[in-house]
Image (cartoon, rainbow, N blue to C red):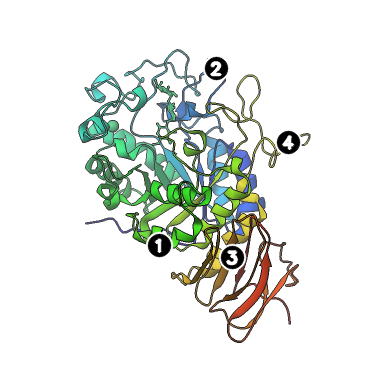
Amino acid sequence: SPQEVSPPEAGVIVHLFEWTWPDIAQECEQVLGPRGYHAVQISPPQEHVIVPELGFPWWQRYQPVSYQLISRSGDRAQLADMVQRCQAVGVDIYADAVINHMAAMDTEPGSAGTTFRRYDYPGLYSSEDFNRCQQPISDYQDADNVTQCELVGLPDLNTALPQVQTQLADYLVDLASLGIAGFRIDAAKHIRSDELAAILQLVRDRVEPAPFIYQEVIDPGTEAIKKHDYYESGAVVDFEYGRLVGEAFLNVGDRSPADLHTVLSSADLVPSQQAVVFIDNHDKQRGHGGGGDYVTYQDGDLHTLSMVFMLAYPYGQPRIMSSYAFETSEQGPPATATGRTRTVYPPDRLGCGGEWVCEHRQPAMTAMVDFRAATQAQPMVTDWWSHGGNQIAFGRGDRGFVVINRASTTLTHTFQTQLPAGDYCELMSAEISATGDCDRVIRVDETGQFRTTVAAMSAIALHHAARAEE
Ligand code: LM2
Ligand code: CA
């Protein structure tokens, strides 16, 4: 029977890409807990390859050497400490689980010092545990090719074998024993859906409560492997959503935000309650994972507005990408010459807002995390409005209202809402103080209307729980 999927719908996930475990613990305590973030997706915690000759690229983490929890982000004790400190402030940790394949690059020992060879990982797997194809994947119309051959030449585990399924389940159960509450299943499209279901069942048999599962299945609708094959195992990351929103905000072809409600309502997307969605992810922001027109931090305000849309729109569970600044696609995180990842909290340099971008700390993002929680109970879009292609507004019934002006001109308009009459704090303009004072008050009249001006390339948002004092 299909796995019961109930992701916390209002819960926002932030991907703290390549952050260290001590930094994540501090971020949970200082920012994520207080701001109501639901969960953090962490980089793969297992032992990985080290590639000094390419300057310690980020993708080292996607080549597992063993399941020892010693990685570029820290060791097992630091991971355990971080999970507990985040849990204590209400933030769950989801681990990126790389279980389709093992490391290809075997010239150096791994991050825990393990010496290995391609197809031979001491005490874990030997050549009989790998699929026979042993050629790079070449035909996405052929399901066997996609699941049995090698993704960019990475040794492909034979996930049909009981001993392989047991090793993988043991790894995930070990992570769960530290308090990790969910898993992003890396390269899920490259694991046969029935074999992945069997591995995850072994985990569920041993872990209470069942971990939240979201599977990476890039399905453009034209290939042999379909996202719905994976629904029985849990949630699925929908890649079409971010592409459609990105193309609209980038005005690709004749697309624009004004069409988005119609476009998203008719697209073949993962059902909302089991979808994880994003505007950009670590692959798409640097042209990996098939590329495509996605919006990233390098697009500035356009990125912020796309994220405001995602957080306001009642579909799926949103994941915010939190990046480090980069110039080339392989470039790893800020690091010393010997490849030690640098902290986000340096006493002497700009960390967040400098070499670490920290999209999740932008005032517009924290405001919209709050908006999503406040509007969660109202799953409908109401009073959709647009003017030209690039000015849109919509409500969430009597819970909230958002206006997004992606145009280069100021927008002044009287908006119809379902909000009760009253004085509302505009969420984007400033932090709302504990006393209820707010920088900008918007008055909704007895007919549910308000008139306001929205600057070019900006947004405003109101919700029922943020009212100005009488
Ligand atoms: C994913 N999701 O399903 C990750 O999001 C993606 O980032 C991973 O690829 C991929 N699956 C495998 O886990 C990244 C990166 C690749 C990189 C691999 C392995 O996008 O470029 O491949 O990690 O580190 C690298 C080299 C590639 C080489 C390969 C094997 O870039 O040129 O292929 O290692 O040595 C010969
Ligand atoms: Ca495979």
Q: Identify the residue under disc 3.
A: 403
Residue 433 is labelled as none
Q: Earlier in the sequence, mark 2 or mark 4?
A: 2
Q: Give me the C-alpha separation between circle 3 and circle 4.
A: 37 Å
Q: Is residue 40 above or below residue 368?
A: above
Amino acid identity at mark 4: Pro
Amino acid identity at mark 3: Val
Q: Give me the C-alpha separation between circle 3 and circle 1.
A: 17 Å
Q: Position of residue 373 (x, y in %)?
A: 54, 65
Callout 3: few (<14), some (14-19), or many (20+) C-alpha neighbours within 10 Å?
many
Query: Is ligand 1 within 8 Å of the beta carbon of the residue shown at mark 1?
Result: no
Q: Residue at image x 61%, y 53%? A: 32
Q: Position of residue 156 (x, y in %)?
A: 30, 27
Q: Nearer the viewer, mark 2 or mark 3?
A: 3
Q: Identify the residue under disc 1.
A: 262
Q: Residue at image x 34%, y 22%? A: 153
User: From where the camera sits, is residue 73 visible?
Assistant: yes
Q: Residue at image x 59%, y 31%? A: 333
Amino acid identity at mark 2: Pro
Element type at mark 2: helix
Q: Give me the C-alpha separation between circle 2 and circle 3.
A: 48 Å
Q: Position of residue 54 (x, y in %)?
A: 53, 18
Q: Earlier in the sequence, mark 3 or mark 1?
A: 1
Q: Nearer the viewer, mark 1 or mark 4?
A: 1
- Image position of 102 (left or right of 230): right
Work out whether residue 268 or residue 97 is closer to the camera in this orientation and state it. 268
Specify the farthest residue to the bottom. Answer: 446
Q: Identify the residue under disc 4.
A: 346
Amino acid identity at mark 1: Thr
Q: Give me the C-alpha separation between circle 1 and circle 4.
A: 46 Å
Element type at mark 3: strand
Callout 4: few (<14), some (14-19), or many (20+) C-alpha neighbours within 10 Å?
few
